[in-house]
Amino acid sequence: MNLLKRYFNNLTVFNFLVTQVLVHVIFGTSFTNTIFHEFEISKEVKNFDIFYSSYNVDTPVFHILGSIIGLEDFRYFAVMVFLVTNIVLYFICYNIAFLDENSVVFLFSGWLVTVSWFMGYVDVFTVLLTVLIFKSLFLKHSKQETIFYAAFLTFNHYGIALFIILIFLVLIFDTELKKFTKFLVFGYLSGRIILEIYLTIVNYNGRSRFRFVFNDNVLDQVFYLSSSNSLDLILSGFLGVLVYLIIYIYYSNSLSKSKIVVSLSIALIGCSLALDTSRVFSMLVLPLNLYLLKNFEKIVKFENLQLKKFLPFVAFIFMIFIDERHLFGSVFTESPNYENTISIYSLVTEFVNNFMKNTWK
């Protein structure tokens, strides 16, 4: 009973319900256009012989899960992705409870749009692991957990992990937590080694992500895109949290402002190495979003408590007003994956019709 109360507390349940409204009503949900390819990779993992050359192979969590469960039907793989995504979303809601009233504001940032529009990518694990690293650093001061979560984050997506860890190093460099630098770096290197061992086991011989960036002249495309749409890029990453960011910057000291500027610069450089620019940016600003929401009330003193309570509503209204967006070759205001022939809703309809075919007339 105590375990149920712990994991199903009011704040966690409320935040999870908010995610469901945002995902299904406000943002909309869709599988990534590579979802079938992810399924194909998962079938080959158990054979230890990946003949695909795409770098999707080096983000292996869903592939491994599908292979362990032994899914041979693409529809069931898609359902697994949807269910696991929502389970992880629940654990994200549970683990952001330390933000108290600002925990719901964290849901108003761009990462949830990314997770909603690109189900099948490992971004939802990236969010959870980033939250866990933040807690292990700033709340628990646990070197073991920091190493473990940093390693898992790297195994999950080593390119995004590199820049997230760099931003964490910026946020802790002038504090007593700077001693955790070596643990973050060790965690990244450990995760990278584990990933390489995995890729060797499954006999992967494709190009790495960084080789793709330089071989296919990606830099020219993405730097032009991000520089031409810089405001859309910033909005896509922060959405409603931008309200908190602006207020935080106004009230913070010069050192805090410098941390924010350097962190944003790292995030902008990191997302400029990927074609799906704002998807990556929304992941890279996660440590910064957590940092400013955690320290917001320490920096910003409210004389009017009603204004303090109303601020999350302002963030929500701002998010709705500016609308969600995504940069991928151009600026999308709805999911670029809506044209997929498969959706979770069509799958549910199909399963229900098949189940009830002998009952319904």
Image (cartoon, rainbow, N blue to C red):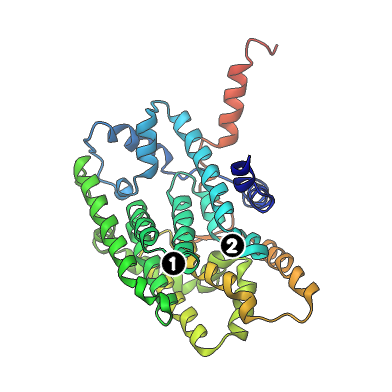
Label number found at residue 351: none
Q: Is residue 242 above or below residue 67?
A: below
Residue 301 drawn above or below residue 283: below
Please name whichever residue, 60 or 34, is drawn nearer the observer in this view of the structure.
60
Position of 231 with respect to 247 (left or right) is left
Left or right, 4 with respect to 191, comes to: right
- Tell which residue pokes out farthest to the bottom in this image: 254
Nearer the observer, 328 or 246: 246
The picture places residue 92, in percent across and down from the top left corner, at 54, 53
Q: Amino acid at mark 1?
A: His
> Residue 98's mark?
2
Image spot of residue 201 (x, y percent): 20, 41
The kind of secondary structure element at disc 2 is: helix
Contact between marks 2 and 1 (CB within 8 A): the answer is: no
Residue 328 in view here? no
- Residue pictured at 44% horizontal, 76% vertical: 171
**Quick check: 133 above or below 175?**
above
Quadrant housing residue 318: bottom right
Front residue of 343/264: it is 264
Mark 2 / mark 1, whichever is N-terminal: 2
Please report the residue visible at 30 percent of the width from the left and 70 percent of the height from the top: 182
Give the residue number, with chain letter if any, for mark 1. 141
x and y percentages locating residue 122 in the rendered image? 42, 49
Q: Residues within 10 Å of mark 2 (few under 14, many from 20)?
A: few
